[in-house]
Image: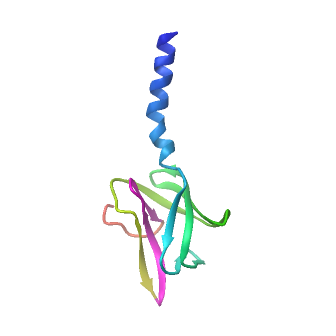
Amino acid sequence: MKRFFGFALMLVLLAAPAFASQKPQTVTFAVAVQVGSTQLPAGDYKLTWTGSGSDVQVTLTQNKKAVVTFPAKAVEGKYNPGVETEAKGGVNILETIQLNSVSLVLGGASHSGQ
């Protein structure tokens, strides 16, 4: 019985980091950004994602309402939290959202780590 509980405890401890990385976090856009065909005004958004590696679905919510969902690639590492955009035709296109331990690179965006 002790062996079973030891195994169960080890399984929980090893699985915990995978679930912790998907805890909702806040992302702040200082200026309006465009994600796909959706224009997001400047402000605070809750960010959640599902999946891992190159198959991630990111959802941004505001006032408990999903504003946009988009595909991205999760690149693990140590990052300074922030966002990367590219100005095209006077519009700021969202390319990357960096959190402490993961960078979410939007589909089609180039990334120096690729």
Task: Give the x, y percent position of residue 80.
Answer: 35, 62
Question: Within the image, what quadrant is residue 13 found in?
Answer: top left
In magenta stretch: residue 103:
yes
Dominant SS type (magenta)? strand
Q: Percent position (x, y) of residue 83?
A: 42, 70
Q: What range of the chain is rendered magenta?
A: 89-106
- Residue 39 coordinates in the image, percent (x, y): 58, 79
Quarter of the image for residue 48 reads: bottom right
Answer with left or right where residue 18 lies relative to residue 78.
right
The residue lying toward the viewer, choosing from 102 and 71, is 102
Q: Is residue 91 above or below residue 53?
A: below
Residue drawn at (46%, 55%) of the image: 54
| 76 up-or-down from 16: above or below | below
Which residue is nearer to you in this view: 28 or 86? 28
- Which residue is located at x 51 percent, y 15 percent? 4
Say which residue appears at 47% left-offset and 81% top-offset: 92
Question: Where in the figure is residue 26, as x and y percent of width and height?
Answer: 52, 62
